[in-house]
Amino acid sequence: MKHLLLVCLFPMTLTAQTMQQLTERLGKTVLYGDVALSPDAAHVAWVQSTAAATSTQTYISGTSGNARAVMVKIPTAGERTEFDPAWSPDSKVLAVFSSAGEKEQRQLWMVNADGSRPKKITNLNGYAARPCWSHDGKRIAFLYIEGGGGGGPLMAAPTTTGEIDTAIHNQRIAVLDVASGQLRQVSPENLHVYDYDWSPDDKTFVATAAPGPGDNNWWIAQIYTIDIASTNATSIYKPWFQVAVPRWSPDGKSLAFIEGLMSDEGFHGGDLFTMTPAGREVTNRTPSRKTSVNSFFWQAPDRILLIEYEGGGSAISELDLTNNSARTIWKGPEGIHAFGNFPNFALSRDGKFAAAVPSTYNSPPEVFVGAPGKWRQLTSNNATLQANWGKAESIEWTNEGSSVQAWLVPPAKIEAEKKYPMVVLIHGGPSSVTTSEWPASFGMARAIIAALSTRGYYVLLPNPRGSYGQGEDFTRANVKDFGHGDLRDMLAGVDAVTKKYPVDPARLGVTGWSYGGFMTMWTVTQTNRFRAAVAGAGIANWQSYYGQNLIDQWMIPFFGASVYDDPAVYEKSSPIRFIKSVKTPTLVIVGERDAECPASQSYEFWHALKTLGVPTRLIIYPGEGHLFIEPKNQADRMDQTVAWFDKYLR
C-alpha cells in the first residue's frame, strides 16, 4: 500500500489552469478559528490563517465600533501554529497554545488583553489542548498527553510496528498554577479525558472519559466527576449513546450535557440532558425537539442558551428549565457551534454579548460581535473576495413520510434552454449535517463545491436520514440500515431537482468523503443512474473494515452488535457484496495513513472494479490521514475530482 504514491492522471490543460486559478483565489480566504470572547465582552480573540496555509497566528481585537485587530507577536524565528485561546476570568489576560520556536511542540503562553508582553509559562513534552481557567483565575487546566501525540483520529495515524496495544498514552487533565508554574496531572492514569469543566468552587471537574486508547473509546465514554485534590474519579452516568460537553450550572447544583447518536468526536448533536452532580434525576430537556443541540451555555440555574442545528442551518434558542419551553432568538443558514472541532461561536459571562464567525456559500467568513443573533461585522479581511459560483438555495422534498432538506448550488452561469450536469455531494458522518458555508476549506474538501459550480455543474448537498437538524429520531433513522433509506432519500431529491431545474438526468455524478465515500461506493452498486463517481476515503466492506480501522467502537451503536456477533447486518450494507452491478466509472481517493477509513478499503473497491473491467483509478496520497493537511495534496484532490467528472459528464 505504501508504494502506491500520488500520480498525475491528467495533463495540464485549460481545465487544470482554470482550477489552479480558482485554487489560488480560494486559498487567499482569511479563516478565523477558535474564537474566544473575554468574559466582560470587551475583547475577542481568534486564531487566523489563510485557506492555503498551515500556520496560524493569534489576533486580539476590542469589540467597540472603532476597534482594530492586532496580531499577538509571540517571538519565533520561523512559522508558528497557535490554538485554543482562553481568557482569564478578569478579562485581563489571554492564554493560548503556540508552537513558536518549538517545531511541533505546543507550549502555553500568556499575553495581556492588548496583545503585549507575551510570556511562555510551560515546558511541556507531549500533546496539549483546550485550556480553561479556574474561576478564581489562579490556575489553568488543559488536556495533556505527556510524552505522546494527539489530535484525534482525523490526523494521520502513526506508523505502528512491534507488539501492538502495549503502550497507551491517555489524555489527562493537567492543572497549572499560574503564579508558581507548578504543573500537576489530576485525572487518573487509566482514563482518557475528552472534555471537562471546572465546578463553580474550583474543587471538582466534570468530564467525559473512557479507558484508552482514546481515539477508539470516545463512543463508550461515560460522565465522571474528578476530585482535584485526591485525583479520584467517579463515574456518575453511563449513557445509551454518546455524550459530549458536560457543564456545571452556575450554582453547582446541576450538570448539563448532550446525548445522542454521534459518529465523530467533536461533531456533536443530540438532546440536552440535566442531572444532579451525583448522577441522579437524569432528565431529557429537549425530547421530540426537531433540532440537534451542538453546544449550550448556562445562563442561570433555570435557563440555558442552546446552539442547535435546524434543517440545514443553525439556531440559537433560550431554554426555560422550569417547563422545558424554548424561545428561538436567531436562526440562519450558517453552521454555528461553540465547542468541539473548529468552534466559531463564543459568549460573554452574562450571556448578553456574543462573538461568531458565520459564513455562507456566497458570503465569506468574518468575525461578528454583538447580542446573540444581532451581531455586527468586526473584520473585513475578505471584503474583496467574490463568489464566482452560483447562488446557493435551500430546497426540501418529502420521502417516505419525512421532509428532507438539501442545499443546491447552481452553475455560475445558466443559459436558457440548456441542460447542465449535476453532482450529488454526500456529507460524512453519517451523524453530521451540511450547512451553508463559504467553500474554501480544502482539508475537508468543501472547495470542490466552488470548483464544480464554476465548471458548469449543479451541486446537490443533501441531508438525508441519519443527519443532524431534525431531531434524534431522524438522526437514528439509518441504524442497522446504512445506505438503504438514506440512498432512497437522496434519489428522491435527484428526482425533485431534475423536475424543477435544468439538470440533465443523463449526466449525473456522485461523490463524498468518509461516510460520503461509502455512500458513493454504495450508490454505484445500487443504481446505474450516475455516469461518474469519485469515492473519497470510502468503505467497501463493513465486515473487513471492522477489523482494519482504529475506531471500531463507533460501529456498535449503528449496527447494534459487533461483526463477530451479527455479521449479516454488516454484509447487508457492504458495497462489495453488490460489486458486479457496478457500471459507473469511479475514481477512488484516500490518504495513506487514514485511521478512520483505511486505505485498504479503497484498494479493495478499486481492485474489484479493475478486475471487472469498470473504468477506475486509485490515488493514495502519501502521509495524509482522514483530514488532508498538505496544501498541494488538497489542491490536487480537487483537480483530480473535477477532471474525472469533466471526462465523463461534460
Image: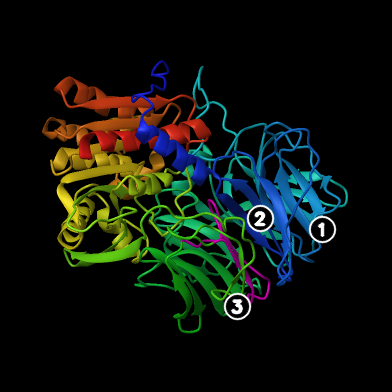
Q: Position of residue 91 (x, y in %)?
A: 77, 65
| Image quadrant where one finds the N terminus | top left
- Element at badge 3? loop
Disc 2 marks which residue?
Answer: 46
Residue 376 left/right relative to 386: right
Q: What is the distance, in whole Å, between disc 3 and disc 1 at their CAs?
A: 25 Å
Residue 191 left/right relative to 363: right
Q: Which residues are magenta?
A: 335-357
Residue placed most toward the observer, 337 or 27: 27
Mark 2 or mark 3: whose residue is earlier in sequence: 2
Indicate yes or no whether the magenta region holds residue 189.
no
Q: Position of residue 326 (x, y in %)?
A: 45, 80
- Element at badge 2? strand
Question: Could you say which quadrant of the image residue 375 lies in?
Answer: bottom right
| Image quadrant where one finds the C terminus | top left
Disc 3 marks which residue?
Answer: 301
Question: Could you say which quadrant of the image residue 611 lies in?
Answer: top left
Q: Are marks 2 and 1 in contact (CB under 8 Å)?
A: no
The image's mark for residue 138 is 1
